[in-house]
Image (cartoon, helix red, strand yellow):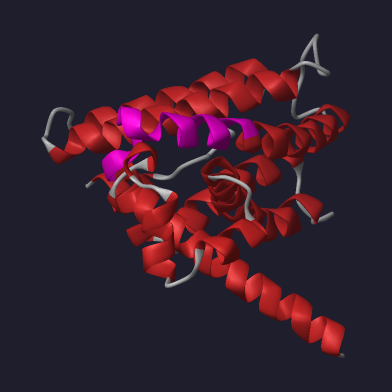
Amino acid sequence: MARTLDLEAHAVRRDVFVDAAQRLIVTRGYEQFSIQDVLEISEASKGAFYHYFDSKGALVDAVVDRMADQATIVLEPILADPSLTAIEKLEGLFNGMARFKAERKDLVLGILRVWESDDNTVVREKLRRIVAARLVPWLERIVRQGVLEGSFSSRFPDQLPRVLATLVQGMSELASQLWVDRQTDAVSLEEVKRTFHAYHEAFERIVDARPGSLKLLDDPTIEFWFA
């Protein structure tokens, strides 16, 4: 029992540093905060910090890993549901990610405000890598099921999941830029909707699905973020 309590206490203390780093990424950007800033927010010593992390980079890895782990908890049940078709799982993947972000709207908006700055280049690259590492296996499962069901078709089914993952990440990065543009009315809400509808069409064509069969992001979700 004592060992279990020690592990729990260890996780709690570690999370204090991760929470501080996440706050600093949102408010300042990766390049603009130091380990000393983390220590001041955490009210901890340098020795305590290095007990858990060997560098600032390792701390940011923990921030990104935690976000990915939290998203996985939301999405894995959708992908594992035997009652869902491949199309329903692909839609569920998008809707689940949208719901995950909506439940953390303040955090997501805080990140978006500084996301495109040079100060967050390191964090963006770390997030791209870990998202790809999680996303490709999920899409492999969906594509495999879709081909068996006959709802998807491709001459290159083994390569298709990575292609789709690239498209998902491109869509996500463009969404960030569109959000920034919406803050200054540089782009209209209708243009944002047309952009996402074009992505829907691209997904359908790539997997050779029936036109109009995919509903990856509905208009209410788009309006929730961009209106």
User: Could you say where residue 220 lies in the image, as x and y percent from the top left?
Assistant: 35, 51
| Quadrant containing the N terminus in the rendered view | bottom right
User: Could you say where residue 168 lies in the image, as x and y percent from the top left?
Assistant: 55, 29
Dominant secondary structure (helix, strand or loop) of the stretch shown in magenta: helix
Above/below status of 110 relative to 20? above
Q: Residue at x 36, y 37 (%)?
A: 31
User: Could you say where residue 52 lies in the image, as x and y percent from the top left?
Assistant: 65, 59
- Can residue 20 be seen at all in this image of the molecule? yes
Is residue 96 left or right of 8 when viewed as pictured? left
Q: Residue at x 60, y 51 (%)?
A: 62
| Residue 144 picture quarter | top right
Is residue 200 left or right of 93 when viewed as pictured? left
- Return the residue found at the far bottom: 1
How many marks overall? 0
Q: Magenta segment range?
A: 113-129
| Residue 128 picture quarter | top right
Q: Residue at x 42, y 58 (%)?
A: 38
- Return the residue found at the far top: 155
Above/below status of 127 relative to 101? above
The answer to whether residue 116 is magenta is: yes
- Can residue 212 be seen at all in this image of the molecule? no
Is residue 66 left or right of 171 when viewed as pictured? right
Above/below status of 144 relative to 71? above
The answer to whether residue 47 is magenta is: no
Q: Residue at x 40, y 55 (%)?
A: 36
